[in-house]
Image (cartoon, rainbow, N blue to C red):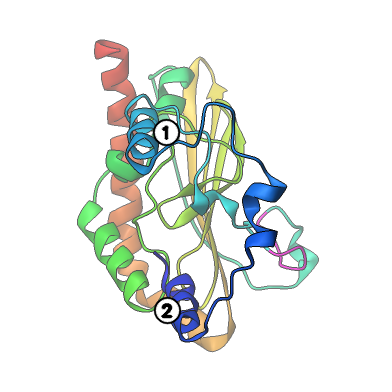
Amino acid sequence: MPTALARPLVGSLINEVVVDPNKSLNGIIPPPPEGLTDVTKAIELALSRISANAVETRWSDAAIPTAPWQKAQSDPAWAGEMILRDLREVITDAPIEKVWEAIEQIGGDNGWYGADFLWFMRGLLDRAIGGVGLRRGRRDPKTLRIGESLDFWRVENIEKEKLLRLYAEMILPGKAWLEFRISEVDGKTKIIQEATFSPHGLGGQLYWYSILPLHSFVFPTMLRNIVRSAKRKVIFG
């Protein structure tokens, strides 16, 4: 449970709760004719949905990716904030649909295509300072949709076999996005991988430049392994 939610819940225990039987929930929403589902059965049903990859939504999907007044990565350059980028691209023989499968399956139990230890440590650090960490995982191991959470990211935009843009919900001195764009070029597939950071003040800029050495390892490895995964999907399906 997120720290921001756990603290007020625990703090509320000092308050006495007075229940009025005349204002019972049953008086507003009557129980179903077949009766209420007991706790054991409810847990079994929930777990069966997880096993069948039939989870429609999760509590972590309820947050809004960005506030309306915040600048989004798709906003024009003149919107005013400094933008720092790590841009990488590659062209591969793997078909575009297999490349898309590899990209869409990123995160959760599938990992982040290399340097997973560094992602794990970043998740631990985020949780230690009150963030969401990596514990949210994925709703579905194969598909994503706009607005749902993905570890400490949120799907800001997705266009099948074209674009996946993730917005960072980890605690940062700024705002960050990770974007993948794919297109067909002369019968081959071009992948553009772009990490974007909008720093808050000098602290945000120092943060970005301090982790550049990690970027030089993490992001090339990620892109390289996405290509490898796509090629394996061609062979093994």
Q: Earlier in the sequence, mark 2 or mark 1?
A: 2
Q: CA distance from mark 2 to mark 1?
A: 31 Å
Magenta span: chief secondary structure = loop
Q: Position of residue 131 (x, y in %)?
A: 42, 70
SS for callout 2:
helix
Q: Residue at x 52, y 34 (%)?
A: 56
Looking at the image, which is closer to me, 4 or 156? 4
Q: Residues within 10 Å of mark 2 (few under 14, many from 20)?
A: few
**Which amino acid, mark 2?**
Val
Q: Residue at x 38, y 30 (%)?
A: 102
Q: Position of residue 194 (x, y in %)?
A: 50, 50
212 vs 83, left or right, is left
Looking at the image, which is closer to me, 52 or 221? 52
As drawn, the label of residue 10 is: 2
**Which amino acid, mark 1?**
Asp
Looking at the image, which is closer to me, 123 or 103? 123
Instruction: Report if residue 221 is visible in the image.
Output: yes
